[in-house]
Image (cartoon, rainbow, N blue to C red):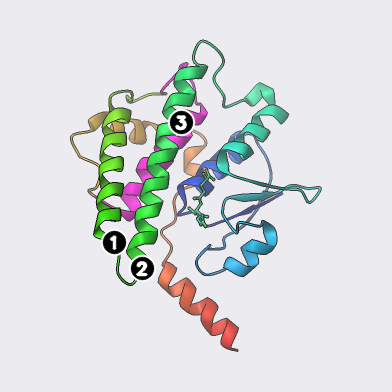
Amino acid sequence: MILWGLMDSPFVRRVALALHHHGRVFEHRKLSVLAHGAQLREVSPLGRVPALTLDDGQVLTDSRAIIEWLDRTDPDRSLTAPAPHLLEMLEIEAIAVGLAEKAVGKSFENRRAAPDPVVLETFDRQIAEAAAWLDARAKGGWLVADRLTRADLALDCATGYVALRHPGLIDPAHVNLAAHAAFCEGQTPFPDAPFEATDIGALIAAAEEEERI
Ligand SMILES: N[C@@H](CCC(=O)N[C@@H](CS)C(=O)NCC(=O)O)C(=O)O
């Protein structure tokens, strides 16, 4: 099994954590969508990460699809909360994944020669409102069902990404988000797959240099 993508992606980290939780052995190829687009488009048509090449060569993309497949093929270790917690878990997971999407979108916008202030402002508002919504549901423990679920992976990876790439963007008054992150980072499997701050500019320069040679 091969996991594609850098460990500064909240979605790649979420999948890496799910793989660790399910005890799957995998090779990790840390390629960047910005520096290694052509290679990643050979893996999957959108060239997005995370992508997971299965042992039979099939390729799954999208963190939710990958985690669903992991859960269904190993139901005893499922990260999906059963009823009556399912709806709450899905609700929180969706808002946390959405927050991460907006935070990644802000990073991409900031890389443009002339970032659009209206787009950046929209991202900031969406992130702030999602963070407030999530803070009202978070605590220094598992979010639902008194155990690790997909919602915890989504929330910890989302807030961790914002702390890494947009420090200070989440209101420090959201103490429940901070408590949830501190709790998760002390639990299995979070320390097995930490965020890695990659210098994307240096990666792009190295990839361009390699192309020239
Ligand atoms: N909803 C997707 C989001 C994946 C995503 O946005 N990945 C980013 C990297 S962090 C990416 O590949 N962006 C390039 C693109 O979408 O073209 C998931 O959960 O996996």
Mark 2: amino acid? Arg
Mark 1: amino acid? Asp
Q: Nearer the viewer, residue 92 or 141?
A: 92
**Residue at the disc numbered 2:** 112
Q: CA distance from mark 2 to mark 3?
A: 29 Å
Residue at x-position 28% and y-position 24% = 136
Where residue 8 sits, quadrant-wise, is: bottom left
User: Percent position (x, y) of residue 26?
Assistant: 67, 48
Q: Secondary structure at mark 1?
A: loop
* Mark 3 or mark 1, earlier in chain: 3
Residue 3 in the image: above or below residue 174: below
Q: Can residue 72 be seen in the rendering of this structure?
A: yes
Q: Can residue 185 be seen in the rendering of this structure?
A: no
Residue reaching furthest to the left:
173
Q: Secondary structure at mark 2?
A: loop
**Residue at the disc numbered 1:** 116
User: Mark 2 against mark 1, which lies toward the viewer?
Assistant: 1
**Residue at the disc numbered 3:** 93
Q: Main secondary structure of the magenta part?
A: helix
User: Mark 3 against mark 1, which lies toward the viewer?
Assistant: 1
Asked if disc 2 and disc 1 are in contact, CB closer than 8 Å, the reply is yes
Residue at x-position 34% and y-position 31% = 180
The magenta segment is 143-167
